[in-house]
Every structure is written in structure tokens, then in C-alpha cells.
Amino acid sequence: MTILEQQRPLPTPIPGVEHATWAGGAQGLSQLSVWRQSLAAGAATPPHRHDCDEVVMCLSGTGEVHLGGAVQRFDADTTVVLPRGVTHQLFNVGNEPLELIAVLGSSPAGTWLPDGEALELPWPT
Amino acid sequence: MTILEQQRPLPTPIPGVEHATWAGGAQGLSQLSVWRQSLAAGAATPPHRHDCDEVVMCLSGTGEVHLGGAVQRFDADTTVVLPRGVTHQLFNVGNEPLELIAVLGSSPAGTWLPDGEALELPWPT
């Protein structure tokens, strides 16, 4: 077993997106990747899809998920379940950072842009 | 997509173990199951193993993992990575509730007792 301190998210090359990988391939996992992310006010993820299940737990802030033409708002103490293989995008639509834990059902977690190009994630999965 | 309120853990038939399933098969997931658990002071899980990767995030309290003869302590803001298929047991060794989020890399999450008997979990995965 491995016991790790939960690292604070740090800036990434994606504007307004901070990230820390809490668990993943570096700990020998193949079925799970656990990410802690913070989106600044007004920031968004790129639109993307994964080849695995994803669950996002909101710790604080106010977000929106855009998925298949639908828009749904979420906030602290809610959980967003995202279907595998469907393009989605998360926005911080509040005035405070949007603090998230995202868990993915694979490591590495394959990630694609809407045009089918692989998105090389700037963090370890 | 599905957006859910994060439910508080409720008592289960396992003494001192409260549980809420935050995401799993009921939301169409097959690769992830997300559990919120609270162990009362002095309580423990049964010794058990899963057929999938597991990551446990500690929100508060003080716990111990017993695994393969090793004992490791963990507390708030640490993450425990548990290898697939290895029997382990979590104890609350503090005076306050041990508050956890456990994510498993499968839904359903097959669970076995040390003697090889399947453990029928008293909650939905």
C-alpha cells in the first residue's frame, strides 16, 4: 500500500486550471486515476472526452457542465457523473475558485478533443 | 450526465460503519464506484479484498490500514492506495469519526473475505 499527502493543485499550461494527481499510474494503478483540480473564476477545461467512466465531486464553487447540447449547473456537495466517451466541458461560472476531485476509471486515462485528436494531458495520470 | 447531492453516510449492518454510495452502477457506471464512509471511534471494516484498484481519501480522523502484516497510520488530507486483490482492513484508531471517500475501479466491486467467501456488501456499488 502507499500513503500519500494530498498535494495542493498547481498551475498547468491550461489557463486557469490547477491540478494535482493524487493517485494513478505512479502508484501502480491501472483502473483508477484521482485528480484534484481548481478552476479559476471564468476558466474552463477544453472540450474533451475520455475512454473511461468519470465522476467529479465538487468541493466548493459553482460550475457548469456542457455535454451534448445540455447545460447543467452544479455546486458544492454535488457529484457529477459523466458518461464514457461523450465530449464534455466544465466551466467555473462563479466568482470563487471551483474546487473539484475527479476520479477516472482508468490509468492512463485516454483523452480526446472533439476533432478526434488525442489531448496530451500536461499532468501524470 | 447525472448531478447528485452528496448524501451523508447512514448506519449499515456493519457495526460502527456508516455508508453512502455517491456514484456507481445506479448511474450507469461500470468502471467506478464512489463511496462515502464514516467509521466510529474504535470501529473497523471487516478484513476483505476487492477485485479492483481502490483509493481511499481521508477527510478527517485517524486510521490504520492493516495489509499483509504491515500496519500504516493515516489521517486527514492523506490518500491510501490499496493494491488490487490483497486483503486489507481499515481501523479508526482515533477518538473522532474517521471520514473517508473510497473510490473503486469497478462497479460492481467484487469483495471477498480472507477465507475466499464473497462478502455481500450491504450497500449498492
Image (tube, coloured by chain):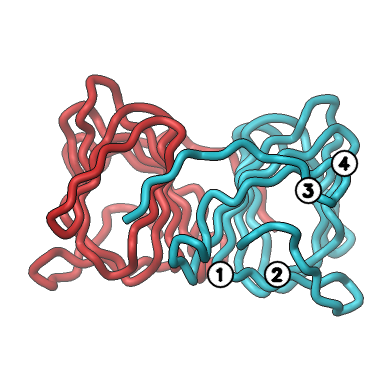
Chain colours: A red, B cyan
Element on which disc 3 rests: loop
What residue is shown at x 63% (from left), y 60% (from top)?
B124
Q: Residue furthest left?
A: A115
How many other residues sit within 10 Å of disc 2, few (<14), some (14-19) or many (≥20)? many
Q: Is residue A73 left or right of residue B50?
A: left
Q: Quadrant of the N terminus of chain A?
A: bottom right
What's the CA distance linking mark 1 and mark 3? 21 Å
Image: B81 above or below B93: below
Q: Is residue A61 left or right of residue B80?
A: left
Do residues under tags 3 and 4 come within 8 Å of each other at their CB atoms? no
Q: Rounded to the nearest whole Å, what is the CA distance between mark 2 and mark 3?
A: 19 Å
Question: Which of the marked residues, 2 or 4, is nearer the chain's N terminus?
Answer: 4
* Residue pointed to by mark 2: B50
Image x and y of residue A94, in percent? 23, 25
Q: Amino acid at mark 2?
A: His
Q: Position of residue A11 (x, y in %)?
A: 28, 36
Rate crowding at label 3 as few (under 14), some (14 to 19) or many (20 or more) other CA atoms within 10 Å.
some
> Mark 3 and mark 4: span between their CA atoms?
12 Å
| Residue to which mark 1 is pinned | B106
Identified by mark 1, the residue type is: Ser
Q: Are marks 1 and 3 in contact (CB under 8 Å)?
A: no
